[in-house]
Image (tube, helix red, strand yellow):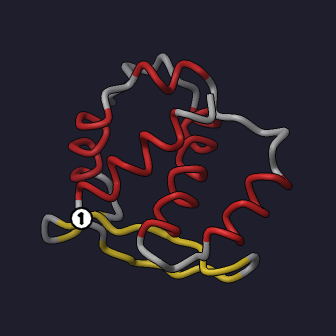
Amino acid sequence: MQSNYRLKHGEAVVGGIFCALFLSEILDYMTPKTLNVILRDFSFIKPHKKITLLNANSVFSSMSSDKKSSMGKSRFVVVEDIGNIVVDVVSDKSSVLTSIEKMNKLV
């Protein structure tokens, strides 16, 4: 565990949800307009500041041992629109790291 258990499960889940939203836009599954609507509507939820202490590259490396990873590729759930998700989306490392950076800016 990259966080060395300093981050609670729920805190990691919230961070992951925001990363998935940003990744959805980066990969062109979601429009910037939809992303802004979701971010505005859920502005009362923010990732915990402890999440910014995690090294994005280490987090990405940890994903390779995740149950959603297969054949060396991490798979993600992304959002096309409110209530419409796509599963098993493969992304390049750069896009994932960018989504983590964007999530960190919300803190």
**Helix, strand or loop status at disc 1:** loop
User: Residue at position x 21%, y 43% from top?
Assistant: 61
User: Horizontally, is 13 left or right of 38 in the view?
Assistant: left
Q: Which residue is rendered at x = 69% and y = 79% of the image?
A: 81
Percent across and percent down for residue 94 are 25, 55
Question: Which quarter of the rendering shows the N terminus?
Answer: top left
Quadrant in the picture for residue 71: bottom left
Q: Is residue 41 above or below residue 106?
A: below
Nearest the viewer among 10 and 83 is 83
Asked if residue 44 is positioned above or below residue 40 in the image, the reply reads: above
- For the residue pair 35 and 57, the one nearer the viewer reads as 35
Answer with the quarter of the image where residue 8 lies: top right
Q: Residues within 10 Å of mark 1 (few under 14, many from 20)?
A: few
Callout 1, which amino acid? Asp
| Residue 65, position as x, y percentages in the image | 24, 50
Q: Position of residue 17 (x, y in %)?
A: 59, 53
Question: In the image, is residue 40 above or below residue 82?
Answer: above
56, above or below 72, in the image: above
Nearest the eye: 97 or 4 = 97
Which residue position holds label 1?
92
Percent coordinates x, y for residue 54 in the rendering: 38, 25
Image quadrant where one finds the C terminus: top right
17 relative to 94 in the view: left or right: right
